Image: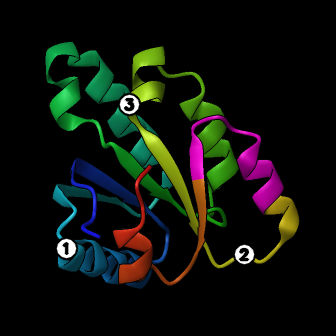
Amino acid sequence: MSARKYQNVMLIDDNEIDNLINQKMVEAAAITQNIFTHSGAKSAIEFLRNAEKLAKAAASLLPEVIFLDIDMPLMDGFQFLDQFDKLSAETKKYCRIVILTSSINPQDMNKAKSYPYVKKFLNKPLNQDALKSLDV
């Protein structure tokens, strides 16, 4: 089974090493042309807001898949989701979110599933099997 292809993928994780490993995994899976990496949820949500302002370019800038860590300082994954909820309906329809976390707390999984644009909940580390069967 070949992996689905996406134009853009975004990684959001405060751990630079996790971001680097995840970026290498995504590159190795060859599922996207562009990878946008953010070490904080605040910069990621700003990126999305700015992409929306560029209307015509938004489709070429917006990530189809966002890998989101939950446990981050300043703005955690759930706060990101609350801000994401305020974006346009088009953006929310276009961007699909995959929670990528080391959390094993069932409450985190249940809370994440309460957001309609969270399509999957994966445990770190990201691996080739998970990417090949992503299909979100």
Quadrant of the frame with the N terminus:
bottom left
- Look at the numbered discs 2 and 3 and tell me whether their residues touch, using CB distance below 8 Å: no
Q: Quadrant of residue 82?
A: top right
> The residue under label 2 is which amino acid type?
Ser
Pointer 3: residues within 10 angstroms few (<14), some, or many (20+)? some
Q: Position of residue 100 (x, y in %)?
A: 55, 67
Instruction: Name the front one of labels 2 and 3.
Output: 3
Q: Which amino acid, mark 1?
A: Glu
How far apart, in angstroms, are the residues tagged by discs 2 and 1?
A: 24 Å
Q: According to the image, label 3 marks what residue?
A: 94
Q: Which residue is mark 2?
A: 103
Are there few (<14), some (14-19), or many (20+) residues within 10 Å of tag 2?
some
Would residue 136 be found to the left or right of residue 115 on screen?
left
- Badge 1 marks a residue whose secondary structure is helix
Q: Please report the bounds of the magenta region as a residue range.
A: 109-119
Is 92 rendered above or below residue 28? above
- The location of residue 132, given as percent across then percent down, is 34, 71
Q: CA distance from mark 2 to mark 3?
A: 26 Å
